Image: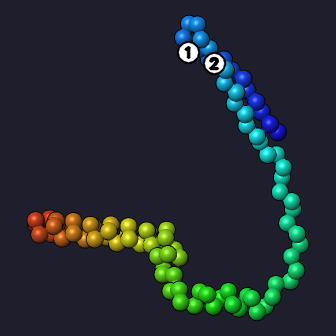
Amino acid sequence: MHIQEHTKKPIDSRTQFEVQTSMTVNLNFPNPPEEQTAPDPEAKTQSFRLFDSIAPSTFAERFPLLTFFAISCAILAGALFTEIECLKDSGYFWR
């Protein structure tokens, strides 16, 4: 599809100039993918060999939300322990 636009813009009170703008839009959709044949088993083993030198993922990379929760709990436990120790040192006691 080809779109053209013509506009007249004034420069001053006596002179005008005309602007032509055009744009081409491609509405053709890509062809559907062709059916693939069965994969070559040798090619599969070769692709896995490319990743032999990569280190395995760590716990934090595999479970980021669980790691965040564990760090939050550790900070909260440390703050509670510190608060209780400060209260004990200041003379507070529980009955």
- Residue 21, position in %: x, y? 69, 30
Q: Tell me: residue 78, above or below residue 8.
A: below
Q: Tell me: residue 20, above or below residue 55.
A: above
**Looking at this view, is 93 or 61 the one in front?**
61
Per the image, the residue denoted by label 2 is: 17
Q: Tell me: residue 94, above or below residue 48.
A: above
Per the image, the residue denoted by label 1 is: 11
Q: Secondary structure at mark 2?
A: strand
Could you tell whether 88 is left or right of 73 in the image? left
Q: Is residue 10 visible?
A: yes
Could you tell whether 88 is left or right of 19 in the image? left
Q: Residue at x 26, y 66 (%)?
A: 79
Q: Secondary structure at mark 1?
A: loop
In what quadrant of the picture does the N terminus appear?
A: top right
**Are the residues tagged 1 and 2 within 8 Å (C-beta)?**
yes
**Crowding at label 2, few (<14), some or many (≥20) Cα neighbours within 10 Å?**
few
Inspect the image, locate mark 1, and give the three-letter code of the amino acid beneath it. Ile
